[in-house]
Amino acid sequence: MKSVTIVKRSTLLPHLLLGFYALVVIVPVLNMVLMSFKSYAEILRFPLGLPSRWHWENYLSAWTKGNLGQLLANTLLVGLASTALVLVCGSMAAYVIARFAFRGNQPIYLTFMAGMALPVQMLAIPMFVVMRQLSLIDNLLSLILAYSAAGLAFSVFLLVNFVRSIPRELDEAAYIDGAGPGAIFVQIILPLLRPALTTVGVFQFVAAWNGFFFPLVFIQDPEHMTVTVGVLSFVGQYGTEWDLLLPALVIVMIPTILVFVFASKQFTRNIAAGAVKM
Amino acid sequence: MVFIAAFLAPALVLYGVFILYAIANSIRFSLYNWTGLGDLGAFVGLANYEFVLWSGSLSSQFWVALGHNFYFFAITLALISVGGLAVAFALTLVRESKAQIYKTIFFIPMVIPPIVVAYLWGMYLDPNSGALSVILRSLHLTMINLPYLGLQATALPTIAVITVWSSLGLYIFIFIPAINNVPAEIIEAAKVDGAGAVRTFFSIVFPNILPTYITVTALVFVAAFGAFDLIYILEGPGAGPDFSTDTIATLFFRSAFGSTQGGASTGMSLAAAMAILGFIVVIGVSAILIALQRRAARQAGEVR
């Protein structure tokens, strides 16, 4: 009998805490989605609860007035291209760092690791100068390169740890069968690395999609802006057009939430595993 | 050997040009008197550092901003320590299937873009039309219906709380496996001795996860030193009200790229010197924390 009461006592309190925190997380977000369907006057007068009438047209006006199609396409390009770049460069580098003893191996690994401690936006001046020399100002390629370079530190660190956890016997067996290092990488390492690549990919995509600083510095032309900075056009000098800004913000956050929910299982296991090894 | 070089080259070129070369260039720019256009101008040695640290109006702004970074770090670390550990520990006490649902919810704010987080909370905290103000007025608590983002005393702490709201998920997920790794026998032994959940946490769990806690401290520190997006969006480039939310990153941005709202640009060279000083602080503190973490990990290993 006694053990039953202990079990009850020990899960009621945790559930209260977890339920409360879940509300703290989810209610503000859901309420914002509800607000995005309200009229401008209702947003300001009744910020809580269901809209009295659902103004679906908010989304249509936000889309056309804010040029959201173009902004989203730009952001998607930056997100996908930098994710691809980080996955290819990061996994190749991680493979040789984890598997081959060569001079400079450890310093190179530590150099990547040290990058995790730098607030990268403080490198904006020299990065801006390089981008200007490469004529990449107002070009989405500047954002792709900047977010990829910034993301490599964490990605190489995580992937090196994962390659190390793959048993060496697998490589050696393939080597005896006559496979070269390139073939071993493609046929053995990459397939086993998939969970780690998912984690790195999600992280990189979210970082590039959410990124605010580099578009602020590198892009002025509205045609080449990304959506996170582009929605600021609804924030006028004389007040914010909430009935347009809110739908735009909902549209901006949907892709990253979808990416996360699809990948969530692998994702949550892996960042934890990587961090513990640190 | 050729193969190793070929595999390393893409990552090294990308990282080398945009991170390492950029660090080297930051140091170079900081030694000249450069306005941002044309050639580098006169070599001035460490004069820019001297200017940032000791003399003129910029030095007072620099020290104030640096102080704000540490204040921001203290608030976020305190909230993440209490909230993150409590939620993570609670998650290890409930059934796995339910924990999974909670975890998915808790992680969502992490992936919401800062622009959305900023306007979401900026809107709720508006003293006239915000949700908080509506709630407080209906409860007749008008005394605490304050413009939290508009008062010098409360603006930075408020942004720190918003930052924790949006990033707590990450730290929870780092804490969970560490708590799960605490040997079940010693937790059982504590239960047999009659210790409740809270007691078990403080006398058994926390000492065992100290290395992970220090890792989180380092991550929170680095994040606090990069604090920019929410401050810029909610308080403008001038980091208002009256610079009360100014951090190294916002001061750097204002100095480097100027702005009409936050005073004139003070020049690329001074901003570069500021960035290097910021890096020294971040790398120094991170190195200390990593050394502490290693020692704690060794001790935890010995105890086990």
Image: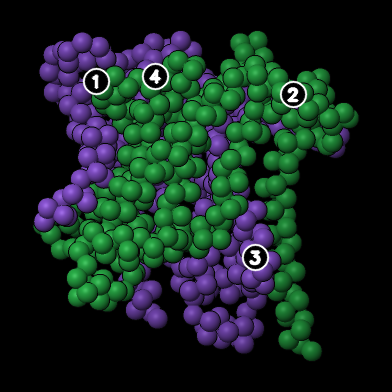
Chain colours: A green, B purple
Q: Which is more N-terminal, label 4 or label 2?
A: 2
Q: Could you say whether the residue bearing mark 2 is in a helix, strand or loop?
A: helix
Q: Is residue B75 left or right of residue B49?
A: right
Q: Amino acid at mark 3?
A: Ala
Q: Residue, x 17% and y 23% (percent of image)?
A: B31
Q: Residue, x 18% and y 49% (percent of image)?
A: B6
- The residue lying furthest to the right in this view is A52
| Whole-number angstrom distance, CA of label 1 to CA of label 2 | 42 Å
The answer to the question of whether label 2 and label 4 lie on touching residues, with beta carbons closer than 8 A, is no
User: Are tags 4 and 3 found on a single chain?
Assistant: no
User: Are tags 4 and 1 found on a single chain?
Assistant: yes
Q: Quadrant of residue B40?
A: top left
| Whole-number angstrom distance, CA of label 2 to CA of label 3 | 37 Å
Chain under callout 4? A
Return the residue at label 1.
A133
Q: Which is more N-terminal, label 2 or label 1?
A: 2
Q: Could you say whether the residue bearing mark 1 is in a helix, strand or loop?
A: helix
Return the residue at label 3.
B99
The answer to the question of whether label 4 and label 3 lie on touching residues, with beta carbons closer than 8 A, is no
Q: Nearer the viewer, mark 2 or mark 3?
A: 2
Q: Amino acid at mark 2?
A: Asn
Q: Could you say whether the residue bearing mark 3 is in a helix, strand or loop?
A: helix
Q: Quadrant of the N terminus of chain A?
A: bottom right
Return the residue at label 4.
A138
